[in-house]
Amino acid sequence: MGKNEFDLIVIGAGSGGLGAALGMLTLGFKVLLVDKKAANFGGECVNTGCVPSKALLYAAGQIHEGRSAGRFGPQLQGEVDFKKVKHYIHEKQKSILAHENPDYLREQGMHIALGTASFISKNEIKVQDNTYKARNIVIATGSSPRSMKIEGAQDFPVFTNETVFDVEYIPRNFVFIGAGPVGIELGQAFSRLGSKVSFVVRGNCILEKEDPEISGVLLEKLKEEGIAFYFDAEVKEIKNADTAVMMQKNGDEKAIPADAIFLGLGRELNFEALHLDKAGIKTKNGKIILNEKLQTSNKNVFVAGDAADNLKFSHAAGMHNALIIKNFISPKKDKLSVAHFPWVTFTDPEVATFGLNEAKLKEKKKNYEKLEISLGEADKAVTNDFEYGRLILFVEKKRFFAGSAKILGGSMVAPHAGEITQELVLANVAGLTLSDLMEKIYAYPTAGNINKIIARKRIVKEIKPWMKKILVQWYRFKE
C-alpha cells in the first residue's frame, strides 16, 4: 500500500468521524482522518454542543440548588461570576479534548490531514495539494445551526450554539427563538444564571417530538422558574437595540425586552466543498441519498453522524459507526434500525425517550397499550420532591397474561430521567417483559422502582373479581 493509499478515509473529526476512524484503526486498518483545522477535532459535541452545554447546565444547576436551599434557612449571597463559569466549561472541554486532537491521534497511529477535502474520483480526495486514495470513504462532516434574518438585528447580539459559549456576560433579557432541546437546555441554564429568559415559538409547544403529556410537565416547571413563553409567534424585528417585536398568529404585535437573541432553529447540511458529483454521489434537496446501510450511490462511500440526516445526536453517530464498521468486516450486512433509539433532553427535570413513540406504533400498525403513571407513586420521588414526574410506557397489547408483554417504547420526565430509564432501554433492546421487571428486586427507596410499579399495576389490573373469588376459596379450603 502506497504512502497516500489507505483502507479508509474519514472526512470530519467530530463524533461521527472520530468513531469510524478510531474503530477501524483499533482493528488494525490504515486510516486517514481529515478535517479543515485542528480546532475542529472533537466536532460540535465537544466544542460547541453536548460537553459545554452540559457543563453550563451543571454550573447553573449548582447555583439554582444553592438558591433553593433558602427554604431550609441558608441564603445564597452574591452575583454569579460568569468568568468562573466559563473557566469551568473550558476545563471540562480540555479534559476530553486531550484524547481528541491531532497530536494524540497521530501517537495512536492515525494519519491526519488538515485542510478542505474534495472528491476527485470515486475513491480519491484532494486535501490542499495532496491526493489520497482509499478502498472506502466515510463522510462525517456534521451540520451547522440554521440561521434567520431579523430586521434591525445587524449589530445586535445574535447567538447560536456555535457562538453562545464565547459570550463574555450574562444577557439581562435573553430571547430564545425556537424551543427544541438545545434552546430549552440553554434557556434554563441562562435563566438560572440570572437572565430574564423568554421563548418565542412558531408552534404551540416545546420539544415537539415529545409526548405533549411529558413536555407539558417540563413546560410548567420552566414557567415556575420565571421563564416566559410566547407560542404561535415569530420575532419580526429589533427596535431601539433593546426590544424584540413579535408578530403573533392572530396578527397582533407584541414588544418584549431583549438584549440578546439565541437562534435554536435546528440544523442544516452543506456538502458544496466536497464536490460529491465527482465521486458519483447523488443528492436530493441538499441531502445525500442513502440506503439502509448508510451507503451512498457510490457503493464505497458511506455517511455517519449529522451528515446522514436521520438522527442528530452524538450517540446516533456511534450507532452509525458500529453499523458501518460491522458491515466493512462482516460478510453479513446489517441495516440501520432506530426501533430502540433513546435520547435525553438534559433540562431539570430531564426528559428521556426511547423506542417507538405512539405515532410510529400507529404507523407500523402495532397492537399496543399505553401505560401511564405519576412518579409520586415512587417513595423516592416523594422524599426528593419530584412527585410531579411522569412515566409513559408503550407495551404489547396481550389478550391473555399481560406479564408477557414486551416493552416497545416510552418517555419519562423527572430529575435524572435519563438514568432512571436506562433499564427500560435495555428491556426494550433485549425484548424483556413486564414480568421480567416484576422479578427484579429494587433497593428501597429508589426512583427506578417506578418501573416495577407500573408493570405491577398492569399485571394486577388483569385479575378479575371472579379470579379473586377462586383464589380465596382455594386458599381457605386447601389442605
Image: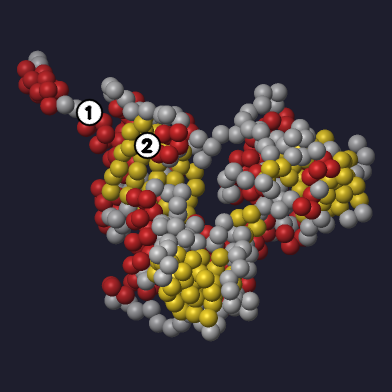
Q: Quadrant of the C terminus?
A: top left
| Image spot of residue 163 (x, y percent) | 63, 68
Res 266 quadrant in image: bottom right
Q: Is residue 398 above or below residue 100?
A: above
* Residue occupying the point 60% across, 55% down: 267
Position of 165 with respect to 452 (left or right) is right
Which residue is most to the top? 479
The quadrant where residue 116 appears: bottom right
Element on which disc 1 rests: loop
Task: Kindly tell me whether residue 87 is visible in this rendering.
Answer: no
Residue 465 placement, left or right of 162: left
Mark 1 vs 2, N-terminal side: 2
Q: Which residue is mark 2?
A: 394
Q: Amino acid at mark 1?
A: Glu
The chosen color scheme is: secondary structure
Residue 77 visible, this orientation: yes
Task: Name the residue nearer the viewer: 352 or 97.
Answer: 352
Q: Position of residue 103 (x, y in %)?
A: 79, 57
Q: Marks 1 and 2, Cα distance to the nearest angstrom? A: 17 Å
Residue 192 is left or right of residue 85, and the answer is left
Name the residue tied to disc 1: 462
